[in-house]
Image (cartoon, rainbow, N blue to C red):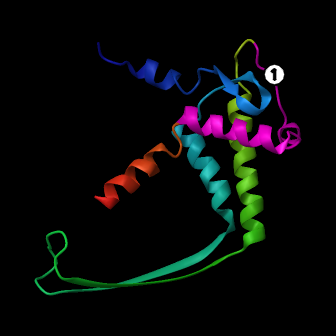
Amino acid sequence: MVASKESILEKAKKPQLVFIKSMEDELPLRPLSKKEAVEVEKIESKAYGKFETNEKAKTKRGMRQKKNQNVESELETKGTIDLAKMTIASQEGKVMAIFISINNDHPDAEKWSKAEIEGMTNADFDDVFEAVREISGIGIEEDEDEEDFQD
């Protein structure tokens, strides 16, 4: 059987009941689409200033090298991060991710405002955000990439 475009696109709209440990109960949440996840990342990245990266590489046998051959590389990065802005932007991104996920068409879903989401206990907020990340597949690719890089 071949997956249809409709079935693939519907997965991001389909809410599911997800157990939230700190609440000891389930909440209807839906996964974020790739576009929504990128929007959340944009919000979170507002705190980063401008970064400059300069890399100098010296090779002994030209540009195409086999793994672990004699390559000298130097990387210099300059940038600024406002930690207060970073904390605020991170929080705004998490609130937006939960807001998108929790406001869905599941029969048991209730409508939430951003202020109500921010009023959750810290444990509930963190557990709901982690559930949204998990059902959306956010963070999974980064872990796999790190494993590939270490090979």
The quadrant in which residue 134 appears is: top right
Relative horizontal placement of residue 14, taking residue 1 as reference (left or right): right
**Most prominent secondary structure in the magenta stretch?**
helix
Q: Residue at x 59, y 35 (%)?
A: 32
Give whichever of 74, 1 is nearer the camera: 74
Relative horizontal placement of residue 57, taking residue 30 as reference (left or right): left
Dot 1 amino acid type:
Glu
Residues drawn in magenta: 108-136
Q: Is residue 2 above or below residue 117?
A: above
Relative horizontal placement of residue 95, taking residue 137 as reference (left or right): right
Q: Position of residue 121 (x, y in %)?
A: 85, 41
Give whichever of 76, 37 is nearer the camera: 76
Relative horizontal placement of residue 71, taking residue 141 as reference (left or right): left
So how many labels did they put on this image? Answer: 1
Q: Is residue 53 above or below residue 4?
A: below
Residue 132 is one of the magenta-drawn residues: yes
Q: Residue at x 60, y 41 (%)?
A: 36
Q: Residue at x 44, y 50 (%)?
A: 143
Q: Position of residue 103 (x, y in %)?
A: 74, 28
Image quadrant holding the C terminus, namely bottom left
Q: Residue at x 67, y 63 (%)?
A: 46
Give whichever of 35, 91 is nearer the camera: 91
As helix, strand or loop, the secondary structure at mark 1 comes to: loop
Q: Position of residue 14 (x, y in %)?
A: 59, 20
Q: Is residue 142 above or below residue 8?
A: below
The quadrant in which residue 26 appears is: top right
Q: Which residue is mark 1?
A: 110
Residue 113 is one of the magenta-drawn residues: yes
Q: Position of residue 39 (x, y in %)?
A: 61, 48
